Image (cartoon, rainbow, N blue to C red):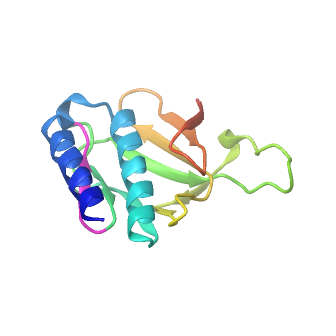
Amino acid sequence: MALAAGVVIANFVSFADRSGQLSAEETLATAIRAARFQAASTRRPTELRFDKESGSLTVGADTRFPLSDDFGENEAGEIRFYFVQPTTGLSRFPDPADSRLETKVLRFDPDRSSSPFIAEIDSGRGAALRLVYDPFSSLVRSSE
């Protein structure tokens, strides 16, 4: 556990040093991976949320992933999360474009899974980018 924590802290420090160089999409992907890892390593559910006031993504209670200057209390940028409707059996997922079940918090369980979700990145400049994430990995299933 101590070794894993040391690796996470070292990676976070290097991430924080280059946070201005990452896009919102890359920062979101990093925060999702960190939330999944934290849930698995602590064996407790971990939450991910967008904090408009600080313009960052927050994992758990104290890990922050700062976003670009487009995001923040006085800026138009925002990241919104939506749940994807569940399916039955082996049927196809509903069209993510139809999902409007907004949530402020994504929860990752100790088995590294989550409810199927969409992340919408709106920088305040142009159309928002909607990313459909796989509930069992940090992979994007599709983007719109």
- Give the percent coordinates (x, y) of residue 82: 56, 53
Q: Is residue 90 left or right of residue 134?
A: right
Residue drawn at 42 percent across, 49 percent down: 32
Q: Is residue 137 above or below residue 51?
A: above
Q: Is residue 56 left or right of residue 105?
A: left
> Is 50 part of what is drawn in magenta?
no
Q: Which residues are magenta?
A: 61-68
Q: Quadrant of the N terminus?
A: bottom left
Q: Is residue 86 above or below residue 30?
A: below
- Give the percent coordinates (x, y) of residue 62: 24, 65
> Is 63 part of what is drawn in magenta?
yes
Instruction: Identify which residue, 49 or 40, lies in the foreground.
Output: 40
When asked about the image quadrant of residue 144, the answer is top right
Q: Is residue 85 left or right of residue 81?
A: right
Q: Is residue 13 left or right of residue 116?
A: left
Residue drawn at 81 percent across, 43 percent down: 92
